[in-house]
Image (cartoon, rainbow, N blue to C red):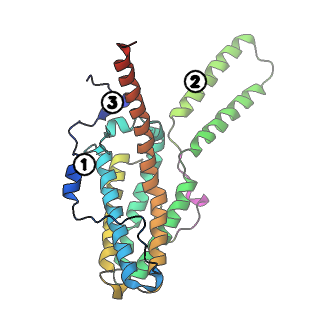
Amino acid sequence: MLATPFTHGLKRAETDRPSLSSYATNNSSLNLIPSNTPVPQTNLAHVPAALLSHIHATCRKRIATLEYLRKVHEGHIYYFNTLLYTPSNLNQLPSMHYSKLGRRASNYLLLGTSIPPLLDMNSDNPLDYLRSLAALLSEYDTYQQLNNPDASVGARGRMGAMFKSGMRGVKGRRSSSVAIESLSESVESAQLDFLPMPPVSSGNLPEFTYLQTPSLPFDPDFHTAFATLADILIDTYSGVVQLLPNAEAIGPGVGEAFGKADKILRKVLVQNATQELGDTTRREVRTEIGGLSRLVLGGLM
């Protein structure tokens, strides 16, 4: 079969994928529960052992997801055996335009530098650690909304409209100057699209208790910041497992604090990354199938 190249330089996975029988062999220890089997109703808030098992299982899932996303962004593995993403073709995706990646990389860097001190200050108290982690992630969510990269598009549009309205108010222009000014407007509007987004003034930001927001002299590299943040979050979930080694460490409020922190983390990082990769993968797979259909049906019609 002829290979059809993907757009943006994406590569299709090889055909020698593991079969279903290999998965069954590797996971032979898994026991499937029939759908008609009644699930025991337990209240996790009053059963420390069940809550501990739930927290450990969630941490293992998050660690596996973060490791997988980091390897996908680094171009080491195919995304669910479909496409191979590399840092070069990731920059060509519409959702990862270079004007947006700088702000996102700065946000990832600020979050990554704010998490490690929490474990140092609360190394012997899991409840305080989880509460401070949830508060930090809540502050980061607020900071990220105030520094949304998509908001710069409207700002640039308003800036261009301001220049145009000011030029329209000038009276007594000659016909020769109209063409020159219209040309300058188009050049200015084109330059505005390539200008880096100005940093938000710290005076307009609310006071943060846990999130560190220093002024960065330049935007860090997005792929390096993402991989580093993924490693820090992996250490964060590993630290939660170490702070909760047994059911005796589960105190009142631990489950609620962990659930709040995990929910915000899923929202601000995991869902965004998986949605971007999922949308692009589905679009590229449809393009590949359409090309193969035309290739196969071309000789029959």
Mark 1 vs mark 3: give the one in front: 1
**What residue is shown with label 1?**
20
Q: Earlier in the sequence, mark 1 or mark 3?
A: 3
Q: Residues within 10 Å of mark 1 (few under 14, many from 20)?
A: few
**What residue is shown with label 3?**
9
The type of residue carrying mark 3 is Gly
The type of residue carrying mark 1 is Leu
Please identify the quadrant where the C terminus is shown: top left
Mark 1 vs mark 2: give the one in front: 1
At a point 25% along the width and 45% down the height, the residue shown is 76
Please identify the quadrant where the N terminus is shown: top left
Above/below status of 263 relative to 190: below
In terms of image quadrants, where is residue 78?
top left
Q: Distance between the Cα atoms at labels 3 and 2?
A: 31 Å
- Residue 140 within the magenta-colored segment of the rendering: no
The type of residue carrying mark 2 is Val
At a point 43% along the width and 73% down the height, the residue shown is 39
- Residue 209 in percent (x, y) is at 51, 71
Q: Distance between the Cα atoms at labels 1 and 3?
A: 29 Å
Above/below status of 21 relative to 60: above
Quick one: 298 or 182, which is closer to the camera?
Answer: 298
In the image, which residues are magenta?
198-208
**What residue is shown with label 2?**
187
Mark 3 vs mark 2: give the one in front: 3
Asked whether, in this view, residue 190 is left or right of residue 288, the answer is right
